[in-house]
Image: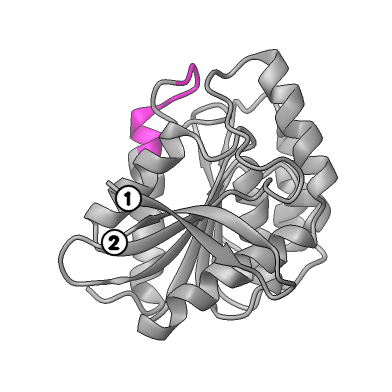
Amino acid sequence: MGTMIELTASDGFTFDAYHVAPAGPRKGGLVLIQEIFGLTAWIKRTADHFGALGYEVIAPSLYDRIERGFIAAEVTPETLQKGVKLATENGLKKPVIDMQACVDRLKAAGPVFAVGYCYGGSAAWIAACEVEGVAAASAYYGSMLPNLAHLTPKCPVIAHFGANDAHISQENVDRFKAEKPDVPVYMYDAGHGFARDGSADYHEPSARLALERTLALFQANGAIA
C-alpha cells in the first residue's frame, strides 16, 4: 500500500500524488499517469502492483490545478463528461510541469519510466516528448496520440490500442503509425480500457500481454533486472 504525498512543481504549485515504495530491490522509478477519471482506486491498485514488482511509483493527481482531488468513484456518462472537461481545461502544458516534478523526485535513485492509461496514455506520450529524464514510456490507448504525432520522443516509447476501441478509430491509429513508423504500436483484440479490471472492456489476456511488453521495455532501457 502506498501513501499520499505532496509535490511542488517548478512554478511553485503544490499537488497531491500517490507514492509507493518498491518491494525488495528497486528496479527503477515510475510515473504512473491516471485515466480521465482521476486518481482512482484502480490507479492506486495499479501503482501498488508496480511497487510489488520493484518500482518506486508516483501517481500524480494531474487535475489538481483545475479541481483538487477529483476522483470519479463510478464510471458514468456524467463522470466521463466531468473528466473530459477537466482534461480539456488542464491543457497540454500544465501536466508537463507536474510530471517533471515527479521525475525530478525519482531520478536521483536511478532511471525513471512513465506509463499511462486513457488520458494518461496521451500524457505518457507527452512525457516522453517533453519531460526531461524519462528513460522509456508505455502509452495505453491514448486518444490524443494521432493529433500529437508531430512531437518527437526523447526516449523509447510503445503504444497500446484496442482493435475494438469505440473512442479511438483504426483510421486514427493508422495515422499515428504512418507518422511515427519507429514507434512500436501493439493492437489487441479488446476495447478501450482493456487494462482496467472491473470495467466492461477489461480483457485479461490483453492486459497481461501489454504489461509484459511494458516491463520488457523498461528492462531494455535501464531497469534493474
Outermost residue to the left: 24
Q: How many marks?
A: 2
- At 60% from the left and 25% from the top, the residue drawn is 164
Q: Which residues are magenta?
A: 199-207
Q: On the image, which quarter does residue 172 sit in?
A: top right
Outermost residue to the bottom: 108
Q: On the image, which quarter does residue 128 sit in?
A: bottom right
Query: Is residue 183 shown left or right of residue 21?
Result: right
Query: Is residue 3 shown left or right of residue 83?
Result: left
Image quadrant in which the C terminus is located: bottom left
Task: Tell me if residue 118 comes above or below residue 12 in the rendering.
Answer: above
Sort mark 1 into few (<14), some (14-19) or many (20+) by Cα contacts within 10 Å. some
- Mark drawn on residue 30: none
Report x, y in % for residue 163: 59, 32
User: Tag 2, which secondary structure?
Assistant: loop
Residue 182 seen in the figure: no
Residue 79 seen in the figure: yes
Report x, y in % for residue 182: 63, 68
- Is 200 a magenta residue? yes
**Disc 1 residue type (three-letter):** Gly
**On the image, numbered disc 2 is attached to which residue?**
21
User: Tag 1, which secondary structure?
Assistant: loop
**Disc 2 residue type (three-letter):** Ala
Sort mark 2 into few (<14), some (14-19) or many (20+) by Cα contacts within 10 Å. many
Observer-nearest of 135 and 73: 73
